[in-house]
Image (cartoon, helix red, strand yellow):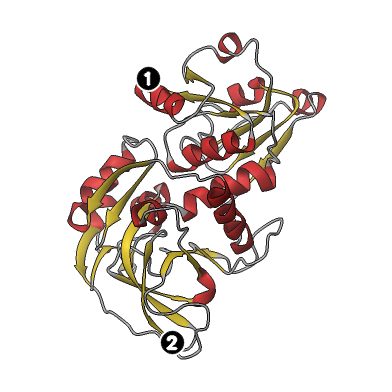
Amino acid sequence: MKAIVHEGKEGLAGLKVKPMEEKEPAGFEVKVRIHTAGMNRRDLAVASKRHKAEDPAVILGSDASGVVEETGSEVTRFKKGDEVIINPGLGWKENSDVPPEGFEIVGFPGHGTFAETYISTEDHLEMKPKHLSMEEAGVLALAALTAYRALFTRGRAKEEDTVMLPGIGGGVLTYALKFAKAEGARVIVTSRSSEKLKQALEAGADKAILTDSDWSEELADERIDLLIESIGAATFHQSLRTVRKGGTIVTFGSSTEDEVSLNLREFFYGQYNLLGSTMGSAEELRAMLAFIERHNIHPEVDRMFSIDQAAEAFEYIRDTKNFGKIGFQMS
């Protein structure tokens, strides 16, 4: 089978499209013919930093939608022809405070979804939401689950809250925008791009400001209850100054530097809550799928690439050209 792999060289120079062995399912395994494989910034991180030149070749990718092609003899949940999505989380079944020991994400260190077929145990698949196209479903799980846990499990967002999303444009925050609006919250976003601010307003944001503006001035009349932070050092202190006293910051990523300094006295006098979040459990994935079906939510799909445009796709997401999700059409 044809696949997008990383091997032999450091960074994006190690990307290549090549034939890989296609296996057959056994026992509780299901073989899925991939239709669309969604791309995440995690794929860029694996190729750029985490997978080394001397490591064995790895098929990249964590997200996908497809059609069940074959099932192992013990499979009961799925049959040939079912339209499914891949759960990108391995080994995290029930909602819990932290992932269990041994939790991994599809696409590293094991093989991922950027291939013509993918084999998974049946407990790591879910039926495709009926209201979504295969392209929409293929770019859903990892980013939408990350947004759902950060917003609701950790952040406890509720109707009439004001939620702020600095750095709108990527997959997680575009889902967070749609989820928060569906819940009845007011949503404020920032971006360095005027075009992305316009797109965010069209997608439902109530207010949009430039990231490099004076937030205290722009938001003088606002009360920020919950702020989802994913930029890191470049915006963290401004985020902390912006959220109301007693409010909550949930962080799930750091696209700039990881380390920040913190004035503890200001922090505890402000009664702030700072919470970390990482993707989510299978239980939360099913809750998220029910949520998007109930509210008829569709992903923000920016662009699709062919498998032979792998290098272009990685450069596109590296340069943050996307608003919403991108992916590969595999069939």
Q: Position of residue 145 (x, y in %)?
A: 54, 52
Quadrant where the C terminus is found in the figure:
bottom left
Q: Looking at the picture, does residue 141 appear above or below residue 151?
A: below
Q: Looking at the picture, does residue 206 appear above or below residue 23?
A: above
For the residue pair 317 and 29, the one nearer the viewer reads as 29
Dividing the picture into quarters, in which one does residue 123 lie? bottom right
Left or right of 267, for residue 328: left
Q: Position of residue 279 (x, y in %)?
A: 56, 53
Q: Which residue is pictured at 47% across the width and 77% down the height? A: 78
For the residue pair 23 and 256, the one nearer the viewer reads as 23
Quadrant where the N terminus is found in the figure:
bottom left
Q: Please tell me whether mark 1 sits on a helix, a strand or a loop.
A: helix
Tally of numbered tags: 2
Q: Position of residue 82 (x, y in %)?
A: 41, 72
Q: Which residue is mark 1?
A: 194
Residue 110: mark in rendering: none
Q: Please tell me whether mark 2 sits on a helix, a strand or a loop.
A: loop
Q: Which residue is pictured at 43% across the width and 45% down the height? A: 299
Kind of residue at disc 2:
Gly
